[in-house]
Amino acid sequence: MTNIKPTLRLSLSYLLVSSAIESVEANVKSWAALGDSYASGIGAGVRRTQAGDTVCSRYTEGYPEVVNVVLDGTAPSNRAFNWVACSGAKTDYVKSTEVPKIASDIDMATLTIGGNDIGFFDILNYCIFQFTSGTTCDDQLQDSSNQIQNDLPAKLDSTILAILNQADKPGFRLYMTGYAGFWNNETTQCNDVSFNFWETKPSDRANLTQELRTTMNTMLSTLNNQISAAVARANDHDLRSPVVFVDYSPSFAGHRYCDEGIPEPDPTGSNPQRWFQENWLFKPHAPYVFSGDAIATMYQSWAQTALDTDPSLQIAGLSGNGTVDVSGSTEWIFDGLARAFHPTVDGHDGIRLEVLSAYSAKPPTVQTATTSAPSSSSSSSASSAASGSATTMTTTATSAPLSSSLSSSSASSAAASGSAPTTTATLTTGSAPLAQRDRHVSSRDAR
Protein backbone atom coordinates (compact mmCIF):
# COMPACT_ATOMS: atom_id res chain seq x y z
CA MET A 1 0.00 0.00 0.00
CA THR A 2 1.28 3.43 -0.89
CA ASN A 3 2.54 5.55 1.97
CA ILE A 4 0.52 8.75 2.22
CA LYS A 5 1.87 11.60 4.27
CA PRO A 6 -0.81 13.06 6.51
CA THR A 7 -1.88 16.60 5.76
CA LEU A 8 -2.01 18.74 8.89
CA ARG A 9 -3.67 22.11 9.14
CA LEU A 10 -1.51 24.35 11.29
CA SER A 11 -1.97 27.94 12.35
CA LEU A 12 0.58 30.24 10.72
CA SER A 13 1.19 31.64 14.17
CA TYR A 14 3.16 28.48 14.86
CA LEU A 15 5.57 29.45 12.11
CA LEU A 16 6.53 32.74 13.74
CA VAL A 17 9.63 33.04 15.85
CA SER A 18 8.91 31.68 19.30
CA SER A 19 9.50 35.03 21.01
CA ALA A 20 6.52 36.49 19.14
CA ILE A 21 3.99 34.00 20.47
CA GLU A 22 2.78 33.39 23.99
CA SER A 23 0.62 30.44 25.02
CA VAL A 24 -1.85 30.94 27.83
CA GLU A 25 -4.29 28.50 29.40
CA ALA A 26 -7.81 28.82 28.07
CA ASN A 27 -11.09 28.17 29.83
CA VAL A 28 -12.98 25.69 27.68
CA LYS A 29 -15.82 27.25 25.73
CA SER A 30 -16.66 24.24 23.59
CA TRP A 31 -15.72 20.58 23.71
CA ALA A 32 -16.81 17.10 22.62
CA ALA A 33 -16.71 13.51 23.85
CA LEU A 34 -16.20 10.72 21.32
CA GLY A 35 -15.84 6.96 21.49
CA ASP A 36 -17.57 3.74 22.47
CA SER A 37 -19.73 2.52 25.38
CA TYR A 38 -17.04 3.38 27.93
CA ALA A 39 -17.36 6.96 26.70
CA SER A 40 -21.16 6.82 26.48
CA GLY A 41 -21.33 5.66 30.11
CA ILE A 42 -23.69 2.73 29.55
CA GLY A 43 -25.37 1.82 32.82
CA ALA A 44 -23.92 4.70 34.85
CA GLY A 45 -26.86 6.54 36.32
CA VAL A 46 -29.95 6.94 34.15
CA ARG A 47 -30.21 6.55 30.40
CA ARG A 48 -30.56 9.97 28.78
CA THR A 49 -33.55 10.57 26.54
CA GLN A 50 -32.40 13.32 24.20
CA ALA A 51 -32.19 12.63 20.50
CA GLY A 52 -29.61 9.92 19.84
CA ASP A 53 -28.90 9.28 23.52
CA THR A 54 -31.14 6.24 23.94
CA VAL A 55 -29.84 4.21 21.01
CA CYS A 56 -26.22 5.12 21.90
CA SER A 57 -26.76 4.28 25.60
CA ARG A 58 -25.53 7.60 26.95
CA TYR A 59 -26.06 7.67 30.71
CA THR A 60 -26.20 10.63 33.05
CA GLU A 61 -23.06 9.75 35.00
CA GLY A 62 -20.73 8.62 32.25
CA TYR A 63 -17.32 10.23 32.67
CA PRO A 64 -17.83 12.87 29.94
CA GLU A 65 -20.90 14.20 31.72
CA VAL A 66 -19.26 14.36 35.14
CA VAL A 67 -16.17 15.99 33.64
CA ASN A 68 -18.42 18.63 32.13
CA VAL A 69 -20.07 19.31 35.48
CA VAL A 70 -16.83 20.47 37.12
CA LEU A 71 -14.66 21.56 34.19
CA ASP A 72 -12.76 24.76 34.99
CA GLY A 73 -14.72 25.02 38.24
CA THR A 74 -17.54 26.75 36.38
CA ALA A 75 -21.14 25.85 35.58
CA PRO A 76 -21.77 23.69 32.49
CA SER A 77 -23.87 26.54 31.08
CA ASN A 78 -20.60 28.39 30.44
CA ARG A 79 -19.59 26.03 27.63
CA ALA A 80 -20.99 24.00 24.76
CA PHE A 81 -20.70 20.24 25.24
CA ASN A 82 -21.28 17.83 22.34
CA TRP A 83 -21.52 14.21 23.51
CA VAL A 84 -21.38 12.01 20.41
CA ALA A 85 -19.88 8.80 21.87
CA CYS A 86 -21.96 5.74 21.07
CA SER A 87 -22.17 2.26 22.54
CA GLY A 88 -20.79 -0.28 20.08
CA ALA A 89 -18.59 2.20 18.22
CA LYS A 90 -15.44 1.10 16.44
CA THR A 91 -12.79 3.37 14.95
CA ASP A 92 -14.53 3.45 11.56
CA TYR A 93 -17.76 4.62 13.20
CA VAL A 94 -15.95 7.37 15.07
CA LYS A 95 -14.45 8.64 11.81
CA SER A 96 -17.57 8.37 9.68
CA THR A 97 -20.28 9.37 12.16
CA GLU A 98 -18.91 11.01 15.29
CA VAL A 99 -16.12 13.22 13.94
CA PRO A 100 -18.32 15.04 11.39
CA LYS A 101 -20.61 16.06 14.26
CA ILE A 102 -17.95 18.04 16.12
CA ALA A 103 -17.14 21.67 15.40
CA SER A 104 -13.77 22.72 14.03
CA ASP A 105 -13.21 25.34 16.72
CA ILE A 106 -13.69 23.22 19.86
CA ASP A 107 -11.08 23.64 22.57
CA MET A 108 -10.77 20.00 23.59
CA ALA A 109 -12.19 16.52 23.19
CA THR A 110 -12.06 13.17 24.94
CA LEU A 111 -11.84 9.81 23.17
CA THR A 112 -12.14 6.19 24.28
CA ILE A 113 -11.89 3.70 21.41
CA GLY A 114 -10.25 0.42 20.38
CA GLY A 115 -11.94 -2.23 22.51
CA ASN A 116 -14.56 -3.13 19.94
CA ASP A 117 -12.01 -3.19 17.12
CA ILE A 118 -10.14 -6.06 18.78
CA GLY A 119 -13.28 -8.16 19.39
CA PHE A 120 -13.71 -7.44 23.09
CA PHE A 121 -17.26 -8.82 23.19
CA ASP A 122 -16.23 -11.87 21.23
CA ILE A 123 -13.86 -12.54 24.12
CA LEU A 124 -16.72 -12.16 26.58
CA ASN A 125 -18.81 -14.54 24.52
CA TYR A 126 -16.30 -17.34 24.05
CA CYS A 127 -14.42 -16.99 27.33
CA ILE A 128 -16.95 -15.71 29.87
CA PHE A 129 -20.67 -15.85 29.00
CA GLN A 130 -20.59 -18.60 26.34
CA PHE A 131 -23.78 -17.44 24.68
CA THR A 132 -22.93 -19.50 21.64
CA SER A 133 -20.12 -21.66 20.35
CA GLY A 134 -18.16 -21.25 17.15
CA THR A 135 -14.58 -20.96 18.28
CA THR A 136 -12.60 -21.68 21.42
CA CYS A 137 -11.64 -19.14 24.06
CA ASP A 138 -7.95 -19.68 23.29
CA ASP A 139 -8.49 -19.10 19.58
CA GLN A 140 -10.46 -15.91 20.24
CA LEU A 141 -7.80 -14.59 22.60
CA GLN A 142 -5.14 -15.24 19.97
CA ASP A 143 -7.21 -13.56 17.27
CA SER A 144 -7.74 -10.47 19.44
CA SER A 145 -4.03 -10.35 20.29
CA ASN A 146 -3.20 -10.45 16.59
CA GLN A 147 -5.60 -7.57 15.95
CA ILE A 148 -4.00 -5.50 18.71
CA GLN A 149 -0.54 -6.01 17.26
CA ASN A 150 -1.25 -5.92 13.54
CA ASP A 151 -4.47 -4.08 12.71
CA LEU A 152 -5.20 -1.69 15.55
CA PRO A 153 -2.26 0.76 15.23
CA ALA A 154 -3.29 2.02 11.79
CA LYS A 155 -6.92 2.28 12.91
CA LEU A 156 -5.97 4.37 15.93
CA ASP A 157 -3.67 6.56 13.84
CA SER A 158 -6.33 7.37 11.26
CA THR A 159 -8.95 8.02 13.96
CA ILE A 160 -6.74 10.47 15.84
CA LEU A 161 -5.77 12.20 12.59
CA ALA A 162 -9.43 12.53 11.60
CA ILE A 163 -10.15 14.32 14.88
CA LEU A 164 -7.11 16.58 14.60
CA ASN A 165 -7.97 17.54 11.04
CA GLN A 166 -11.52 18.35 12.11
CA ALA A 167 -10.63 20.15 15.35
CA ASP A 168 -7.82 22.30 14.00
CA LYS A 169 -7.92 25.18 16.46
CA PRO A 170 -4.47 26.15 17.79
CA GLY A 171 -4.13 24.97 21.36
CA PHE A 172 -6.68 22.16 20.91
CA ARG A 173 -6.22 19.14 23.18
CA LEU A 174 -7.42 15.56 22.72
CA TYR A 175 -7.46 13.46 25.90
CA MET A 176 -7.44 9.82 24.84
CA THR A 177 -8.09 7.21 27.51
CA GLY A 178 -7.16 3.57 27.70
CA TYR A 179 -9.13 0.85 29.48
CA ALA A 180 -8.89 -0.90 32.86
CA GLY A 181 -8.11 -4.55 33.58
CA PHE A 182 -11.20 -6.32 34.92
CA TRP A 183 -9.76 -8.86 37.28
CA ASN A 184 -7.83 -9.34 40.45
CA ASN A 185 -5.75 -12.17 39.05
CA GLU A 186 -3.89 -12.98 42.28
CA THR A 187 -6.77 -14.53 44.20
CA THR A 188 -7.86 -18.16 43.87
CA GLN A 189 -11.47 -17.86 45.00
CA CYS A 190 -12.79 -17.48 41.43
CA ASN A 191 -11.00 -20.48 39.97
CA ASP A 192 -14.16 -22.61 40.12
CA VAL A 193 -16.61 -19.80 39.38
CA SER A 194 -18.32 -19.39 36.02
CA PHE A 195 -20.34 -16.53 34.48
CA ASN A 196 -21.76 -18.92 31.87
CA PHE A 197 -25.13 -17.69 30.59
CA TRP A 198 -26.59 -21.18 30.25
CA GLU A 199 -26.94 -24.03 32.71
CA THR A 200 -24.24 -26.45 31.51
CA LYS A 201 -22.35 -29.49 32.64
CA PRO A 202 -19.31 -28.59 34.76
CA SER A 203 -17.05 -29.93 32.03
CA ASP A 204 -18.53 -27.43 29.57
CA ARG A 205 -18.20 -24.35 31.74
CA ALA A 206 -15.61 -21.62 31.28
CA ASN A 207 -14.30 -20.91 34.78
CA LEU A 208 -12.62 -17.70 35.90
CA THR A 209 -9.22 -19.27 36.46
CA GLN A 210 -6.17 -17.27 37.38
CA GLU A 211 -4.71 -18.11 33.99
CA LEU A 212 -7.71 -16.67 32.14
CA ARG A 213 -7.86 -13.58 34.35
CA THR A 214 -4.15 -12.95 33.89
CA THR A 215 -4.38 -13.38 30.12
CA MET A 216 -7.28 -10.94 29.84
CA ASN A 217 -5.59 -8.34 32.06
CA THR A 218 -2.39 -8.64 30.05
CA MET A 219 -4.33 -8.15 26.84
CA LEU A 220 -5.93 -4.96 28.21
CA SER A 221 -2.46 -3.73 29.19
CA THR A 222 -1.19 -4.41 25.66
CA LEU A 223 -4.18 -2.56 24.24
CA ASN A 224 -3.36 0.44 26.44
CA ASN A 225 0.25 0.34 25.26
CA GLN A 226 -0.91 0.52 21.65
CA ILE A 227 -3.18 3.46 22.43
CA SER A 228 -0.31 5.24 24.20
CA ALA A 229 1.98 4.58 21.23
CA ALA A 230 -0.60 5.99 18.82
CA VAL A 231 -0.78 9.15 20.93
CA ALA A 232 3.00 9.49 20.75
CA ARG A 233 3.00 9.05 16.96
CA ALA A 234 0.30 11.69 16.56
CA ASN A 235 2.30 14.18 18.61
CA ASP A 236 5.40 13.46 16.55
CA HIS A 237 3.51 14.59 13.45
CA ASP A 238 1.70 17.66 14.75
CA LEU A 239 3.57 20.73 15.95
CA ARG A 240 0.85 21.34 18.51
CA SER A 241 1.56 18.03 20.32
CA PRO A 242 -2.14 18.07 21.01
CA VAL A 243 -2.90 14.54 22.24
CA VAL A 244 -2.66 13.37 25.86
CA PHE A 245 -2.89 9.72 26.91
CA VAL A 246 -4.96 9.10 30.06
CA ASP A 247 -4.15 5.79 31.76
CA TYR A 248 -6.71 5.24 34.48
CA SER A 249 -6.24 1.47 34.88
CA PRO A 250 -4.01 1.78 37.98
CA SER A 251 -6.77 3.66 39.79
CA PHE A 252 -9.03 0.59 39.46
CA ALA A 253 -6.75 -1.47 41.74
CA GLY A 254 -8.88 -2.79 44.59
CA HIS A 255 -12.05 -2.22 42.57
CA ARG A 256 -12.03 -5.24 40.24
CA TYR A 257 -13.84 -8.56 39.90
CA CYS A 258 -12.59 -11.39 42.14
CA ASP A 259 -11.06 -9.11 44.77
CA GLU A 260 -9.97 -10.82 48.00
CA GLY A 261 -12.84 -12.05 50.15
CA ILE A 262 -15.59 -11.00 47.71
CA PRO A 263 -17.66 -13.91 46.36
CA GLU A 264 -18.44 -14.09 42.67
CA PRO A 265 -21.01 -13.96 41.24
CA ASP A 266 -22.00 -11.03 43.43
CA PRO A 267 -25.74 -10.59 42.85
CA THR A 268 -26.34 -8.66 46.07
CA GLY A 269 -23.58 -6.13 45.46
CA SER A 270 -21.60 -7.22 48.51
CA ASN A 271 -18.52 -5.50 47.08
CA PRO A 272 -19.45 -1.80 47.08
CA GLN A 273 -15.84 -0.99 46.22
CA ARG A 274 -15.93 -2.71 42.84
CA TRP A 275 -15.87 -0.24 39.96
CA PHE A 276 -17.21 -2.67 37.37
CA GLN A 277 -20.91 -3.37 37.23
CA GLU A 278 -22.21 -6.57 38.73
CA ASN A 279 -23.21 -9.49 36.54
CA TRP A 280 -26.97 -9.01 36.62
CA LEU A 281 -27.53 -12.49 35.25
CA PHE A 282 -27.42 -13.66 38.86
CA LYS A 283 -29.23 -10.69 40.40
CA PRO A 284 -32.64 -11.45 41.96
CA HIS A 285 -35.51 -9.73 40.16
CA ALA A 286 -33.24 -8.37 37.44
CA PRO A 287 -35.21 -6.33 34.88
CA TYR A 288 -35.68 -8.65 31.93
CA VAL A 289 -36.02 -5.86 29.42
CA PHE A 290 -34.47 -5.77 25.97
CA SER A 291 -32.67 -2.44 25.81
CA GLY A 292 -32.13 -2.36 22.06
CA ASP A 293 -28.59 -0.99 22.19
CA ALA A 294 -25.66 -2.47 20.30
CA ILE A 295 -24.47 -4.73 23.10
CA ALA A 296 -27.88 -6.19 23.96
CA THR A 297 -28.62 -6.67 20.25
CA MET A 298 -25.43 -8.64 19.82
CA TYR A 299 -26.05 -10.76 22.91
CA GLN A 300 -29.58 -11.41 21.73
CA SER A 301 -28.36 -12.64 18.36
CA TRP A 302 -25.83 -15.00 19.91
CA ALA A 303 -28.30 -16.40 22.43
CA GLN A 304 -30.98 -16.89 19.76
CA THR A 305 -28.48 -18.85 17.67
CA ALA A 306 -27.81 -21.13 20.65
CA LEU A 307 -31.54 -21.61 21.30
CA ASP A 308 -32.17 -22.47 17.66
CA THR A 309 -29.58 -25.22 18.00
CA ASP A 310 -30.79 -26.49 21.38
CA PRO A 311 -34.28 -25.29 22.46
CA SER A 312 -33.88 -27.04 25.83
CA LEU A 313 -31.28 -24.57 27.08
CA GLN A 314 -32.05 -22.83 30.37
CA ILE A 315 -30.60 -19.61 31.74
CA ALA A 316 -28.12 -20.07 34.57
CA GLY A 317 -28.58 -18.34 37.91
CA LEU A 318 -32.39 -18.23 37.89
CA SER A 319 -32.98 -20.61 40.82
CA GLY A 320 -35.34 -18.97 43.27
CA ASN A 321 -35.83 -15.98 41.01
CA GLY A 322 -38.70 -17.35 38.97
CA THR A 323 -38.51 -18.48 35.36
CA VAL A 324 -38.31 -16.79 32.00
CA ASP A 325 -40.03 -18.13 28.91
CA VAL A 326 -37.27 -18.37 26.35
CA SER A 327 -39.17 -20.39 23.79
CA GLY A 328 -38.69 -18.92 20.34
CA SER A 329 -37.51 -15.51 21.55
CA THR A 330 -34.55 -13.82 23.17
CA GLU A 331 -36.35 -10.63 24.19
CA TRP A 332 -35.26 -11.59 27.71
CA ILE A 333 -31.70 -10.40 27.10
CA PHE A 334 -31.93 -7.69 29.71
CA ASP A 335 -30.25 -4.34 29.94
CA GLY A 336 -28.39 -5.19 33.13
CA LEU A 337 -26.42 -7.99 31.45
CA ALA A 338 -25.25 -5.62 28.72
CA ARG A 339 -23.79 -3.38 31.43
CA ALA A 340 -21.50 -6.03 32.91
CA PHE A 341 -17.78 -5.35 32.42
CA HIS A 342 -18.44 -1.61 32.19
CA PRO A 343 -17.54 0.90 34.92
CA THR A 344 -19.97 1.76 37.69
CA VAL A 345 -20.83 5.32 38.64
CA ASP A 346 -17.85 5.29 41.01
CA GLY A 347 -15.70 3.87 38.23
CA HIS A 348 -16.65 6.72 35.93
CA ASP A 349 -15.91 9.13 38.74
CA GLY A 350 -12.43 7.59 38.96
CA ILE A 351 -12.00 8.09 35.22
CA ARG A 352 -13.19 11.69 35.64
CA LEU A 353 -10.42 12.39 38.14
CA GLU A 354 -7.76 10.99 35.81
CA VAL A 355 -9.05 12.98 32.83
CA LEU A 356 -9.12 16.16 34.89
CA SER A 357 -5.64 15.46 36.21
CA ALA A 358 -4.40 15.21 32.61
CA TYR A 359 -6.34 18.36 31.76
CA SER A 360 -4.73 20.22 34.66
CA ALA A 361 -1.25 19.07 33.62
CA LYS A 362 -1.74 19.98 29.95
CA PRO A 363 -4.79 22.19 29.38
CA PRO A 364 -5.93 23.65 26.09
CA THR A 365 -4.15 26.90 25.24
CA VAL A 366 -4.62 29.98 23.13
CA GLN A 367 -1.86 31.75 21.25
CA THR A 368 -1.53 35.52 21.63
CA ALA A 369 0.92 37.92 19.98
CA THR A 370 3.59 39.57 22.15
CA THR A 371 5.48 42.81 21.56
CA SER A 372 8.29 41.03 19.71
CA ALA A 373 8.31 41.95 16.05
CA PRO A 374 7.80 39.05 13.65
CA SER A 375 9.75 38.69 10.44
CA SER A 376 8.36 40.41 7.37
CA SER A 377 7.42 37.08 5.85
CA SER A 378 5.10 36.35 8.74
CA SER A 379 3.72 39.80 9.52
CA SER A 380 0.29 39.05 8.12
CA SER A 381 0.02 36.01 10.39
CA ALA A 382 1.08 38.00 13.44
CA SER A 383 -1.55 40.60 12.65
CA SER A 384 -4.15 37.87 12.43
CA ALA A 385 -3.04 36.38 15.76
CA ALA A 386 -3.17 39.78 17.46
CA SER A 387 -6.70 40.36 16.22
CA GLY A 388 -7.83 37.07 17.71
CA SER A 389 -8.34 35.19 14.46
CA ALA A 390 -6.23 32.27 13.36
CA THR A 391 -4.97 32.29 9.80
CA THR A 392 -4.57 28.71 8.67
CA MET A 393 -2.51 26.98 6.06
CA THR A 394 -2.08 23.46 4.83
CA THR A 395 1.33 21.86 4.92
CA THR A 396 2.62 18.35 4.45
CA ALA A 397 4.47 16.68 7.29
CA THR A 398 8.09 16.10 6.45
CA SER A 399 8.50 13.15 8.78
CA ALA A 400 7.28 9.63 8.22
CA PRO A 401 3.53 9.00 7.94
CA LEU A 402 1.66 7.80 11.01
CA SER A 403 1.21 4.42 9.36
CA SER A 404 1.50 2.92 5.92
CA SER A 405 -2.25 2.95 5.56
CA LEU A 406 -2.87 6.44 6.93
CA SER A 407 -4.66 8.97 4.76
CA SER A 408 -5.72 12.48 5.54
CA SER A 409 -9.05 11.77 3.91
CA SER A 410 -10.17 9.69 6.90
CA ALA A 411 -11.88 12.66 8.49
CA SER A 412 -13.98 13.28 5.40
CA SER A 413 -15.75 9.90 5.40
CA ALA A 414 -19.45 10.27 4.68
CA ALA A 415 -21.41 10.64 7.90
CA ALA A 416 -23.84 7.85 8.63
CA SER A 417 -27.53 8.54 9.15
CA GLY A 418 -27.02 8.97 12.89
CA SER A 419 -28.04 5.47 13.90
CA ALA A 420 -26.00 3.62 16.47
CA PRO A 421 -23.39 1.08 15.38
CA THR A 422 -24.77 -2.42 15.05
CA THR A 423 -21.70 -4.44 15.95
CA THR A 424 -19.82 -4.91 19.18
CA ALA A 425 -19.76 -2.55 22.12
CA THR A 426 -17.47 -1.63 25.00
CA LEU A 427 -18.27 -1.38 28.78
CA THR A 428 -20.91 -0.26 31.56
CA THR A 429 -21.92 1.26 35.00
CA GLY A 430 -24.18 1.75 38.18
CA SER A 431 -23.62 2.81 41.81
CA ALA A 432 -24.12 5.63 44.31
CA PRO A 433 -26.10 8.66 43.09
CA LEU A 434 -24.35 11.83 42.10
CA ALA A 435 -25.53 13.68 45.17
CA GLN A 436 -23.60 11.31 47.41
CA ARG A 437 -20.26 12.43 46.03
CA ASP A 438 -18.55 15.80 45.76
CA ARG A 439 -19.01 17.05 42.20
CA HIS A 440 -17.81 20.58 42.89
CA VAL A 441 -14.06 20.00 42.98
CA SER A 442 -12.27 22.41 40.72
CA SER A 443 -10.69 20.63 37.76
CA ARG A 444 -7.46 22.46 38.56
CA ASP A 445 -7.34 20.70 41.95
CA ALA A 446 -8.56 17.26 40.84
CA ARG A 447 -6.03 14.51 40.81
Image (cartoon, helix red, strand yellow):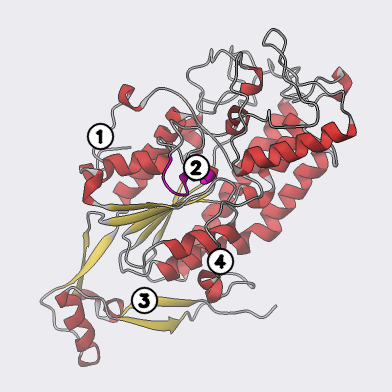
Range shown magenta:
49-57
Give amino acid for label 4.
Answer: Ser
The alpha-carbon separation of the residues under discs 3 and 4 comes to: 18 Å
Dot 2 amino acid type: Thr
Q: Position of residue 312 (x, y in %)?
A: 87, 23
Residue 133 in which image quadrant: top right
Q: Earlier in the sequence, mark 1 or mark 3?
A: 3
184 or 98, nearer to the observer: 98
| Location of residue 22 by image quarter | bottom left
Circle count: 4
Which circle's residue, 3 or 4, is located before the other in the chain? 3
The residue that mark 1 highlights is 441
Residue placed at 60% from the left, 52% from the top? 421
Mark 4 or mark 2: which comes first in sequence?
2
Query: Looking at the image, is mark 2 or mark 1 earlier in the sequence?
Result: 2
Q: Which residue is mark 2?
A: 54
Tell me if label 2 and label 1 are in contact, CB under 8 Å.
no
What is the x, y in percent for residue 190? 69, 18
Does 56 lie within the magenta span? yes
Write down the residue under mark 4: 158
In front of the other: 55 or 111: 55
Q: Nearer the viewer, mark 4 or mark 2?
A: 2
Q: Secondary structure at mark 4?
A: helix
